[in-house]
Image (spheres, rainbow, N blue to C red):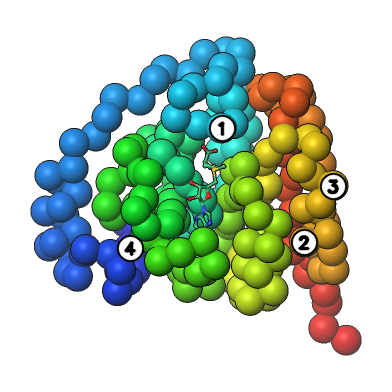
């Protein structure tokens, strides 16, 4: 499998591959909590996590070197687990970032909650985990949704889905299920939106 090459960006502190290596090397990786067989709420993640849920996400998400963008990654706990499992996840956060778990090579920032990160145009999949603002999901879909992204996974409280589902209208097939069906808590929902491919006429 070819090594993952993550494009550097202006806001990253990593201008060269050497810098990226050096900074990543200096980053003190926190030890990740071991995920149990049943969903548990961890202090650093809104979504309740479990080993089965992580395994389910690994099946849904594209393999490295395809880029997966997690938009609003917070502390980065879920994302760090996915990286440990071999996926190429990059967490996007607003400055000053609350990130604690992601190395600089796997973390990018934007200047404010209204900003979008252009790496979305190069990612094969996006994650929105407990997004606060529907407008953020909608803006990403409007601006980058017709690019290379094939899959968008939305995970959040069941009660928030009603206002978010309209973001996936149009050219998307959406599979919605309770998170408890795949290793999460019953109050959470997982929606997997897959870009519909239309055959040329
Ligand atoms: C409710 S928190 C969820 C954090 C994390 N996904 C979790 O499950 O713990 C929503 C996050 O979205 C981030 N956010 C808001 N607007 C954003 C934007 N435009 N780009 C990236 N992140 C954003 C916030 O800073 C916040 O950390």
On the image, numbered disc 1 is attached to which residue? Answer: 46
Mark 4 vs mark 1: give the one in front.
Answer: 1
Q: Is residue 166 above or below residue 52?
A: below
Residues tagged 3 and 2 counted as in contact (Cβ below 8 A): no
The residue beneath circle 3 is: 162
Respond yes or no on whether mark 1 lies under 8 Å from ligand 1.
Answer: yes
Q: Classify mark 4: residues with Cα within 10 Å, few (<14), some (14-19) or many (20+).
A: few
Total count of labels: 4
- Indicate which disc, 3 or 4, sits on the residue closer to the N terminus: 4
Q: Is residue 102 above or below residue 69?
A: above
User: Is any atom of residue 85 visible in this view?
Assistant: no
Label 1: which secondary element: loop
**Residue of label 4:** 5
Q: Earlier in the sequence, mark 1 or mark 3?
A: 1
Q: Is residue 27 above or below residue 77?
A: below
Task: Give me the disc on residue 182.
Answer: none
Residue situated in front as seen by the camera: 59 or 13 = 13
Which of pointers 3 and 2 lies earlier in the amino acid sequence? 3
Cα distance between the residues tagged 4 and 1? 29 Å
Question: Badge 3 local density, few (<14 within 10 Å), some, or many (20+)?
Answer: few
Q: Residue at x 43, y 34 (%)?
A: 77
How far from the left and from the top, in percent, is residue 33? 39, 20
Q: Which type of secondary structure does the marked residue at label 2 adopt?
A: helix
**Can you say whether 147 is above or below 28 in the image?**
below
Question: Circle 2 sits on which residue?
Answer: 167
Cα gap from disc 1 to disc 3, whole angstroms: 19 Å
Q: CA distance from mark 2 to mark 1?
A: 21 Å
Q: Locate the C terminus and report the quarter of the image it occupies.
A: bottom right
């Amino acid at each position: 499998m070819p090594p993952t090459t993550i494009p550097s960006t202006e806001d990253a502190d990593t201008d060269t591959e050497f810098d990226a290596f050096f900074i990543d090397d200096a980053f003190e990786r926190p030890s990740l909590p071991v995920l149990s067989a049943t969903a548990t709420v961890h202090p650093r993640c809104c979504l309740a996590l479990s080993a089965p849920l992580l395994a389910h996400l690994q099946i849904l998400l594209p393999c490295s070197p395809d880029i997966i963008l997690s938009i609003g990654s917070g502390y980065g706990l879920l994302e760090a687990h996915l990286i440990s499992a071999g996926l190429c996840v990059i967490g996007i956060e607003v400055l000053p970032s609350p990130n604690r778990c992601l190395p600089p090579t796997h973390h990018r920032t934007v200047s404010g909650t209204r900003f979008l990160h252009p790496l979305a145009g190069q990612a094969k999949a996006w994650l929105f985990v407990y997004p606060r603002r529907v407008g953020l999901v909608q803006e990403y879909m409007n601006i980058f949704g017709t690019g290379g992204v094939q899959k968008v996974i939305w995970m959040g409280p069941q009660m928030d889905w009603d206002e978010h589902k309209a973001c996936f209208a149009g050219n998307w097939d959406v599979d919605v299920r309770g998170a408890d069906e795949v290793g999460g808590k019953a109050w959470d929902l997982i929606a997997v939106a897959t870009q519909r491919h239309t055959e040329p006429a």
